[in-house]
Image (cartoon, rainbow, N blue to C red):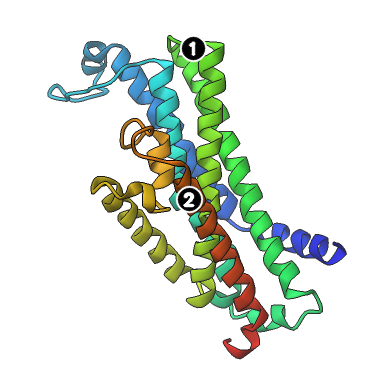
Amino acid sequence: MKAFKQAFSAEALKTFRSKVPALTLLGLSLGPLVGGFFMVVLKDPEKARKMGMIGAKAHLVGNADWPSYFGFLAQIIAMGGMIVFAFAASWVFGREFADRTVRGLLATPTPRSSIVAAKFSVIALWSALLSAWVFALGFLIGKIVVLPGLTRQLALSATFDFFFCAFLTILLLPAVALVACLGRGYLAALGFTFLTLFIGQIAAATGWGAWCPWSIPAIFSGAAGPRGPMLFYFSYWIVAITSLAGAFFTFAWWNRADHTT
Protein backbone atom coordinates (compact mmCIF):
# COMPACT_ATOMS: atom_id res chain seq x y z
CA MET A 1 0.00 0.00 0.00
CA LYS A 2 2.89 2.38 0.77
CA ALA A 3 4.36 1.76 -2.67
CA PHE A 4 1.00 2.48 -4.28
CA LYS A 5 0.61 5.73 -2.35
CA GLN A 6 4.05 6.88 -3.43
CA ALA A 7 3.38 5.94 -7.04
CA PHE A 8 -0.02 7.62 -6.96
CA SER A 9 1.47 10.82 -5.56
CA ALA A 10 4.12 10.85 -8.28
CA GLU A 11 1.64 10.18 -11.09
CA ALA A 12 -0.84 12.73 -9.79
CA LEU A 13 1.91 15.34 -9.49
CA LYS A 14 3.11 14.70 -13.05
CA THR A 15 -0.41 14.84 -14.43
CA PHE A 16 -1.64 17.93 -12.62
CA ARG A 17 1.56 19.85 -13.40
CA SER A 18 0.95 19.24 -17.10
CA LYS A 19 -1.50 20.92 -19.45
CA VAL A 20 -3.70 17.82 -19.60
CA PRO A 21 -6.11 18.83 -16.79
CA ALA A 22 -6.65 22.30 -18.26
CA LEU A 23 -7.13 21.00 -21.81
CA THR A 24 -9.54 18.25 -20.81
CA LEU A 25 -11.48 20.58 -18.52
CA LEU A 26 -11.82 23.14 -21.31
CA GLY A 27 -12.76 20.50 -23.86
CA LEU A 28 -15.60 19.01 -21.85
CA SER A 29 -16.80 22.40 -20.55
CA LEU A 30 -17.74 23.35 -24.09
CA GLY A 31 -20.45 20.67 -24.09
CA PRO A 32 -22.78 22.15 -21.45
CA LEU A 33 -22.17 25.64 -22.86
CA VAL A 34 -23.16 24.54 -26.36
CA GLY A 35 -26.15 22.70 -24.91
CA GLY A 36 -27.21 25.82 -23.05
CA PHE A 37 -26.90 27.85 -26.25
CA PHE A 38 -29.20 25.44 -28.08
CA MET A 39 -31.69 25.54 -25.23
CA VAL A 40 -31.78 29.36 -25.45
CA VAL A 41 -32.32 29.18 -29.20
CA LEU A 42 -35.01 26.51 -28.95
CA LYS A 43 -36.93 28.54 -26.36
CA ASP A 44 -37.50 31.32 -28.90
CA PRO A 45 -36.12 30.58 -32.40
CA GLU A 46 -37.55 33.76 -33.93
CA LYS A 47 -35.91 35.97 -31.33
CA ALA A 48 -32.65 34.10 -31.83
CA ARG A 49 -32.81 34.77 -35.58
CA LYS A 50 -33.44 38.48 -35.03
CA MET A 51 -30.48 38.65 -32.66
CA GLY A 52 -28.25 36.94 -35.21
CA MET A 53 -27.64 33.87 -33.05
CA ILE A 54 -28.72 31.57 -35.90
CA GLY A 55 -29.15 31.95 -39.64
CA ALA A 56 -32.47 32.86 -41.20
CA LYS A 57 -32.75 29.43 -42.83
CA ALA A 58 -31.76 27.40 -39.79
CA HIS A 59 -34.16 24.55 -39.03
CA LEU A 60 -34.11 23.42 -35.41
CA VAL A 61 -35.89 20.43 -33.93
CA GLY A 62 -36.16 19.72 -30.22
CA ASN A 63 -37.58 20.90 -26.92
CA ALA A 64 -36.08 23.46 -24.57
CA ASP A 65 -36.69 21.59 -21.32
CA TRP A 66 -34.83 19.69 -18.64
CA PRO A 67 -35.40 16.17 -20.04
CA SER A 68 -33.87 17.21 -23.37
CA TYR A 69 -30.97 19.00 -21.71
CA PHE A 70 -30.19 16.13 -19.35
CA GLY A 71 -30.19 13.80 -22.36
CA PHE A 72 -27.77 16.12 -24.13
CA LEU A 73 -25.42 16.12 -21.13
CA ALA A 74 -25.44 12.31 -21.03
CA GLN A 75 -24.52 12.19 -24.71
CA ILE A 76 -21.69 14.66 -24.12
CA ILE A 77 -20.14 12.49 -21.43
CA ALA A 78 -20.63 9.32 -23.49
CA MET A 79 -19.13 10.53 -26.77
CA GLY A 80 -17.13 13.58 -25.78
CA GLY A 81 -15.91 11.78 -22.68
CA MET A 82 -14.73 8.86 -24.78
CA ILE A 83 -12.35 11.22 -26.59
CA VAL A 84 -11.34 13.48 -23.70
CA PHE A 85 -10.87 10.71 -21.14
CA ALA A 86 -8.88 8.71 -23.69
CA PHE A 87 -6.67 11.75 -24.33
CA ALA A 88 -5.82 11.83 -20.62
CA ALA A 89 -5.25 8.06 -20.52
CA SER A 90 -2.98 8.13 -23.56
CA TRP A 91 -0.91 10.90 -21.98
CA VAL A 92 -0.59 9.20 -18.59
CA PHE A 93 0.51 5.90 -20.12
CA GLY A 94 2.36 7.26 -23.15
CA ARG A 95 4.25 10.19 -21.67
CA GLU A 96 7.32 8.28 -20.51
CA PHE A 97 7.73 6.72 -23.96
CA ALA A 98 7.44 10.06 -25.76
CA ASP A 99 9.90 11.67 -23.32
CA ARG A 100 12.18 8.60 -23.41
CA THR A 101 12.15 8.34 -19.63
CA VAL A 102 10.46 4.95 -19.39
CA ARG A 103 13.73 3.10 -18.68
CA GLY A 104 14.32 5.29 -15.66
CA LEU A 105 10.80 4.61 -14.46
CA LEU A 106 11.26 0.87 -14.85
CA ALA A 107 14.53 1.04 -12.93
CA THR A 108 12.90 2.48 -9.80
CA PRO A 109 12.36 0.16 -6.82
CA THR A 110 8.60 0.81 -6.93
CA PRO A 111 6.75 -2.36 -7.98
CA ARG A 112 5.47 -2.07 -11.51
CA SER A 113 2.04 -3.23 -10.48
CA SER A 114 1.89 -0.24 -8.15
CA ILE A 115 2.91 2.11 -10.96
CA VAL A 116 0.22 0.77 -13.28
CA ALA A 117 -2.41 0.81 -10.54
CA ALA A 118 -1.46 4.41 -9.74
CA LYS A 119 -1.76 5.44 -13.38
CA PHE A 120 -5.20 3.84 -13.66
CA SER A 121 -6.28 5.49 -10.41
CA VAL A 122 -5.21 8.95 -11.58
CA ILE A 123 -7.07 8.50 -14.86
CA ALA A 124 -10.23 7.24 -13.15
CA LEU A 125 -10.15 9.98 -10.53
CA TRP A 126 -9.66 12.79 -13.03
CA SER A 127 -12.32 11.38 -15.36
CA ALA A 128 -14.77 11.17 -12.45
CA LEU A 129 -13.99 14.75 -11.42
CA LEU A 130 -14.47 15.94 -14.99
CA SER A 131 -17.81 14.15 -15.13
CA ALA A 132 -18.96 15.79 -11.91
CA TRP A 133 -17.87 19.19 -13.26
CA VAL A 134 -19.78 18.73 -16.51
CA PHE A 135 -22.94 17.75 -14.65
CA ALA A 136 -22.63 20.63 -12.16
CA LEU A 137 -21.91 23.16 -14.91
CA GLY A 138 -24.77 21.82 -16.98
CA PHE A 139 -27.18 22.03 -14.06
CA LEU A 140 -26.12 25.63 -13.37
CA ILE A 141 -26.58 26.59 -17.02
CA GLY A 142 -30.00 24.95 -17.08
CA LYS A 143 -31.00 27.02 -14.06
CA ILE A 144 -29.70 30.22 -15.67
CA VAL A 145 -31.60 29.51 -18.89
CA VAL A 146 -34.72 28.77 -16.75
CA LEU A 147 -35.60 25.48 -18.40
CA PRO A 148 -39.01 24.03 -17.53
CA GLY A 149 -39.90 20.49 -16.47
CA LEU A 150 -37.53 19.87 -13.56
CA THR A 151 -38.87 17.49 -10.93
CA ARG A 152 -37.18 15.61 -8.10
CA GLN A 153 -37.80 12.27 -9.80
CA LEU A 154 -36.35 13.54 -13.09
CA ALA A 155 -33.30 14.98 -11.32
CA LEU A 156 -32.57 11.68 -9.55
CA SER A 157 -33.10 9.62 -12.70
CA ALA A 158 -30.99 11.96 -14.84
CA THR A 159 -28.20 12.02 -12.26
CA PHE A 160 -28.03 8.23 -12.19
CA ASP A 161 -28.13 7.97 -16.00
CA PHE A 162 -25.40 10.58 -16.42
CA PHE A 163 -22.96 9.10 -13.92
CA PHE A 164 -23.59 5.52 -14.98
CA CYS A 165 -22.90 6.62 -18.54
CA ALA A 166 -19.67 8.23 -17.33
CA PHE A 167 -18.81 5.01 -15.47
CA LEU A 168 -19.27 2.93 -18.63
CA THR A 169 -17.06 5.34 -20.55
CA ILE A 170 -14.33 5.21 -17.90
CA LEU A 171 -14.40 1.40 -17.97
CA LEU A 172 -13.23 1.49 -21.58
CA LEU A 173 -10.00 3.36 -20.75
CA PRO A 174 -7.79 0.33 -19.94
CA ALA A 175 -7.92 -0.65 -23.61
CA VAL A 176 -6.60 2.82 -24.52
CA ALA A 177 -3.86 2.47 -21.91
CA LEU A 178 -2.84 -0.90 -23.35
CA VAL A 179 -2.53 0.54 -26.86
CA ALA A 180 -0.48 3.46 -25.50
CA CYS A 181 1.93 0.93 -24.00
CA LEU A 182 2.08 -1.25 -27.10
CA GLY A 183 2.47 1.78 -29.35
CA ARG A 184 4.99 3.37 -26.96
CA GLY A 185 3.42 6.81 -27.02
CA TYR A 186 0.30 8.92 -27.46
CA LEU A 187 -0.42 8.65 -31.17
CA ALA A 188 -1.33 4.98 -31.38
CA ALA A 189 -3.72 5.35 -28.43
CA LEU A 190 -5.38 8.44 -29.91
CA GLY A 191 -5.71 6.71 -33.27
CA PHE A 192 -7.22 3.70 -31.53
CA THR A 193 -9.71 5.98 -29.77
CA PHE A 194 -11.00 7.49 -33.00
CA LEU A 195 -11.09 4.06 -34.62
CA THR A 196 -13.21 2.63 -31.81
CA LEU A 197 -15.47 5.69 -31.91
CA PHE A 198 -16.02 5.05 -35.62
CA ILE A 199 -16.58 1.33 -35.03
CA GLY A 200 -19.05 2.14 -32.28
CA GLN A 201 -21.04 4.41 -34.60
CA ILE A 202 -21.14 1.77 -37.33
CA ALA A 203 -22.13 -0.98 -34.89
CA ALA A 204 -24.97 1.11 -33.47
CA ALA A 205 -26.21 2.07 -36.94
CA THR A 206 -26.25 -1.55 -38.13
CA GLY A 207 -28.01 -2.92 -35.07
CA TRP A 208 -24.98 -4.54 -33.43
CA GLY A 209 -24.43 -1.83 -30.84
CA ALA A 210 -25.47 -4.03 -27.92
CA TRP A 211 -22.49 -6.29 -28.67
CA CYS A 212 -19.90 -3.56 -29.24
CA PRO A 213 -18.39 -2.11 -26.04
CA TRP A 214 -17.66 1.22 -27.73
CA SER A 215 -21.30 1.64 -28.74
CA ILE A 216 -22.84 0.88 -25.37
CA PRO A 217 -22.18 4.16 -23.48
CA ALA A 218 -23.61 6.22 -26.37
CA ILE A 219 -26.64 3.94 -26.66
CA PHE A 220 -27.19 4.14 -22.91
CA SER A 221 -27.11 7.94 -23.15
CA GLY A 222 -29.97 7.89 -25.64
CA ALA A 223 -27.90 9.10 -28.59
CA ALA A 224 -29.36 6.34 -30.79
CA GLY A 225 -32.89 6.52 -29.40
CA PRO A 226 -34.54 4.75 -26.43
CA ARG A 227 -32.00 2.34 -24.95
CA GLY A 228 -34.55 -0.24 -23.77
CA PRO A 229 -34.91 -2.09 -27.07
CA MET A 230 -31.21 -1.73 -27.94
CA LEU A 231 -29.37 -2.93 -24.81
CA PHE A 232 -29.61 -6.01 -22.63
CA TYR A 233 -27.91 -7.05 -19.40
CA PHE A 234 -25.07 -8.81 -21.15
CA SER A 235 -24.17 -5.51 -22.86
CA TYR A 236 -22.88 -4.21 -19.53
CA TRP A 237 -20.90 -7.39 -18.99
CA ILE A 238 -19.27 -6.84 -22.38
CA VAL A 239 -18.03 -3.43 -21.21
CA ALA A 240 -16.80 -4.94 -17.92
CA ILE A 241 -15.00 -7.80 -19.68
CA THR A 242 -13.37 -5.37 -22.12
CA SER A 243 -12.21 -3.26 -19.18
CA LEU A 244 -10.81 -6.21 -17.24
CA ALA A 245 -9.05 -7.57 -20.32
CA GLY A 246 -7.46 -4.20 -21.03
CA ALA A 247 -6.30 -3.85 -17.43
CA PHE A 248 -4.99 -7.43 -17.26
CA PHE A 249 -2.91 -7.13 -20.42
CA THR A 250 -1.63 -3.70 -19.40
CA PHE A 251 -0.37 -5.10 -16.10
CA ALA A 252 1.09 -8.09 -17.94
CA TRP A 253 2.87 -5.85 -20.44
CA TRP A 254 4.46 -3.76 -17.71
CA ASN A 255 5.68 -6.89 -15.92
CA ARG A 256 7.74 -7.82 -18.99
CA ALA A 257 8.49 -4.27 -20.21
CA ASP A 258 12.27 -4.74 -19.83
CA HIS A 259 12.14 -7.09 -22.80
CA THR A 260 10.10 -4.79 -25.02
CA THR A 261 11.49 -1.28 -24.45
Could you tell whether 116 is left or right of 238 in the image?
right
User: Residue sitting at 30 percent across and 50 percent down?
Assistant: 208
Nearest to the observer: residue 227 or residue 115: 227
Question: Where 182 sits versus 246, above or below?
Answer: below
Query: Compared to 108, does 170 lie above or below?
Result: above
Q: Position of residue 32 (x, y in %)?
A: 45, 31
Question: Amino acid under label 2?
Answer: Val
Q: Residue at x 50, y 77 (%)?
A: 182
Q: Secondary structure at mark 1?
A: loop
Q: For the residue carrying disc 2, how many other residues have a C-alpha within 10 Å: few (<14), some (14-19), or many (20+)?
A: many
Q: Is residue 205 above or below residue 116?
A: above
Q: Mark 1 or 2 closer to N-term?
A: 2
Residue 147 in picture, x, y percent from top left = 43, 12
Q: Which residue bears the numbered disc 1?
A: 150
Say which residue appears at 40% left-offset and 65% top-offset: 192
Q: Nearer the viewer, residue 216 or 185?
A: 216
Task: Specify the quadrant that holds the C terminus.
Answer: bottom right
Q: Does any portion of residue 91 appear in the rendered image?
A: no
Residue furthest out toward the bottom: 259
The quarter in which the N terminus is drawn is bottom right
Is residue 219 rendered to the left or right of residue 164? left
Identify the residue position indicated by label 2 in the image: 84
Q: What amino acid is at disc 1?
A: Leu
122 to 227, vertically: above or below? below
Q: Quick one: which residue is furthest to the left in this view?
A: 57
In this image, 60 relative to 249: left or right?
left
Task: List x then y, in percent, for residue 213.
Answer: 43, 53
**Nearer to me, 173 or 7:** 173
